[in-house]
Structures are given as C-alpha cells and as structure tokens.
Image (cartoon, helix red, strand yellow):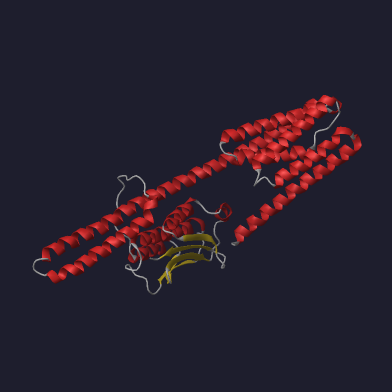
C-alpha cells in the first residue's frame, strides 16, 4: 500500500472513531436526562442506541437502517405527544439521523429516493420537536433541528454534486479513450487485411509458374489472419461508433524513443531502456500503441506535477509472458493534490486502455520518494 493510501486509510478510520465517540457522548447526555425526568424519556436512549447501530452498519444497510431509525423515532414522538409527557429530543438519536441524512443524499440511487428520504427525516425531526415539547420549548427545538437538518442536507447535496461531476468526467474520459481504441482497431485490422489481400494476389500470380511458392504464401495469409483475429478479440469490447478522426500509422519502439528524446529536449532528461527480447515483432500492435499512450501521459504528468524532477527513468522489460513499462521520476515529489485525489483523469484514461487489453496499471508514490507509473500487459 502506498504512503498516501495508508494516510487516507488511517484518516478515515480516525474520523469514524471520532464520530462514534461523539455519538457515545450524546448518548450519555440522553441517559443523564432520562435519569432526571424518568417516565417515557427512557425510550429516547434506546432510540439513540438504535441510531448508533444504524450509523455503524450504514455501509451495508444504509436505507434499511435509516428507515428503521426514522420509524422508531417517530413512534416515540407520537407516544410522548399523545400521553402528554414533557419529554426532550434525544441528542444521539438526532445526531444519527443527521449523519444518515448526509449519507443518503450522497449515495442512494436514484436521486429522487434520496430526496424523498431526506424530506421524511425532516418530518421526523419536526415531530420530535413538537411531540417532546419540554416546558413549551417546542418552537426552539423545531428551529434548532431545522437548522441541523439544513446543514446536513446542504453537505449531502454538495457531496452528491461533486460525486456526479466526478462520475461524469470519468465517463467522458473513458468514452474518449474507447473511441481512440476503436480507431486504432480500425487501423490494425485494415493493416492485416491489406497484407492478406496482397499475399493472396501474389500467391495467385505465382500459382501457375511456381506452385511450390503457394504453400508459404498460404501460411503467411493464415498468420496474418490469426493476428487480426487476436487484435479484434482483445479490443472489440471497447469498439464504438466510427467518426472521421485522422488515422495514424502503427507505433514502433522507435516512436517511443523519439517521444523520450523530445521530452528530454524540453524538460528533465529521460533515461529510456528497452530490455532484451523486445522488438517490434514481439509486441502486438495494440499493445505498442497503448505503451506509447501510457509513456506519453506519464511524461506529461511529470512535466505538470513534478517540475523540479532531476531526471526520469523509463524502462520496458519482458517478464516471461508479460511486458512491463515503468516510468518514475527522481529528485522531486509528486504533486500532493494528485496524491490526495487518487490520480487525475489522465490516469483514468491510461487505466482504461491498459485494462481493455487485459493488463494492470499502478500509479503512485515510489520507494525513492518520487512518482511512478507501472503498466503490465500479458503477451499471447
């Protein structure tokens, strides 16, 4: 686990513990109030316990726990109101309702159900203030609970808005990457089919004069057809509607070197090493184009987020049935904003392309304190 991920993990754990600690303190206040007033007020701490349980289990039973808590709170308010008991709203109960309201507005789908549940929670809180009208203080309780609900609804709505924006941006990036992959698939298949047609025409031309040359030509045709089918199987799942975007020729290892040389001319020096057993014939064309894309995006991120990097190391190596590209910078830490966000949309696009070919991508802090991107592709 990277250092940034470990920090995020512990921040979340400590935040959860702090939230439950506050609810426990509120429950203690409810117990003290119940001990001072007796009667039906003892129902309030039990509702607070149910609220804490609903908060603890909210990731697994978010809607179910919220509905049970709202029903129990409303029932207690109705009982106190009908019996005329001079009760007090529960602090732990109210805190749990507000916390769950934030979570419901942020996560529940569709959004109309989230809005409906949040409105029901407001009704329950108002019933809590009116039904537990301690010494004619119902209006004060109503105002305080409405302010609390408004803040919770605002936070939940804002988090929902940010989440929707992020989801839409990720979808747009993935769609753009898939369209680019579709164009590359078009180029690859067209290249293979052109080779098949040329070799078939050549075999037909020499069939009468040199029959012995037909068999090697047929073998070459079969090989080209197999390559085309392999490329299609690996990329057809991301095929999208064609457009009139410009086509580009297949990428080679020389293009990767040109990319690193161009980057070195205007930025930190790049040491690019290609391991043994790797050449233009050993790597499928779709893997080669994706390697170029990952290398380009990785170098762009170095220029944007690690401008003080002394130098960059990139290496492409073969490990049994896989090829691995690693790009890492030295002498400068990655941008902390990228680390906190878990990566930008460029990383989303890279991951989309790598995973479409059955590979894996890792982007995060390196052991040396810089930033690294590692992309692994299986080989046929």
Q: Tell me residue 145's x, y (percent).
A: 74, 32
Q: Tell me residue 307's x, y (percent).
A: 50, 59
The image shows residue 15, relative to residue 257, as above or below, that is above
The image shows residue 314, relative to residue 113, as above or below, that is below
Front position in the image: 18 or 4: 18
The image shows residue 177, relative to residue 378, as above or below, that is above
Residue at 57% in and 65% down: 369
Residue at 51% in and 59% down: 363
Front position in the image: 52 or 156: 52
The image shows residue 380, relative to residue 338, as above or below, that is below
Residue at 30% in and 59% down: 228
Q: Residue furthest bottom?
A: 276
Does the image show residue 251?
A: yes
Front position in the image: 269 or 272: 272
Quarter of the picture holding the N terminus = bottom right
Q: In which image quadrant can residue 273 be found?
A: bottom left
Does the image show residue 248?
A: no
């Amino acid at each position: 686990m990277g250092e940034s991920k470990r920090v995020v993990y512990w921040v979340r754990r400590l935040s959860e513990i702090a939230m439950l600690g506050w609810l426990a303190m509120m429950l203690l206040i409810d117990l003290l109030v119940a001990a001072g007033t007796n009667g039906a007020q003892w129902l309030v701490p039990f509702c607070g316990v149910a609220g804490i349980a609903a908060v603890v289990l909210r990731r697994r039973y978010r809607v179910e726990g919220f509905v049970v808590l709202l029903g129990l709170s409303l029932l207690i308010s109705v009982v106190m109101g009908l019996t005329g008991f001079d009760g007090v709203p529960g602090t732990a109960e109210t805190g749990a309702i507000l916390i769950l309201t934030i979570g419901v507005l942020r996560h529940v789908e569709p959004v109309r159900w989230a809005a409906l549940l949040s409105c029901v929670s407001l009704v329950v809180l108002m019933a809590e203030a009116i039904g537990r009208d301690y010494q004619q203080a119902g209006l004060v309780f109503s105002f305080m609970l409405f302010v609390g609900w408004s803040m919770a609804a605002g936070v939940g709505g804002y988090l929902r808005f940010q989440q929707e924006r992020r989801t839409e941006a990720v979808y747009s990036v993935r769609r753009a990457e898939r369209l680019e992959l579709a164009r590359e698939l078009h180029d690859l298949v067209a290249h293979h089919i052109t080779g098949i047609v040329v070799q078939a025409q050549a075999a037909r031309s020499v069939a009468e004069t040199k029959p012995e040359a037909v068999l090697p030509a047929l073998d070459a045709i079969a090989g080209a057809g197999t390559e085309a089918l392999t490329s299609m199987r690996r990329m057809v799942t991301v095929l999208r509607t064609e457009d009139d975007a410009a086509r580009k020729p297949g990428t080679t290892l020389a293009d990767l070197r040109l990319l690193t040389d161009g980057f070195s001319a205007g930025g930190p020096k790049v040491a690019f090493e290609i391991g043994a057993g790797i050449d233009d014939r050993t790597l499928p064309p779709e893997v080669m184009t994706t390697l170029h894309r990952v290398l380009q995006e990785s170098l762009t991120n170095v220029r944007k987020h690690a401008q003080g990097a002394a130098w960059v190391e990139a290496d492409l190596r073969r490990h049994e049935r896989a090829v691995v590209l690693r790009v890492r910078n030295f002498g400068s830490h990655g941008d902390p904003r990228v680390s906190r966000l878990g990566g930008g949309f460029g990383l989303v696009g890279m991951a989309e392309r790598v995973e479409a070919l059955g590979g894996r991508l890792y982007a995060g802090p390196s052991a040396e304190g810089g930033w690294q991107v590692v992309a692994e592709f299986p080989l046929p």
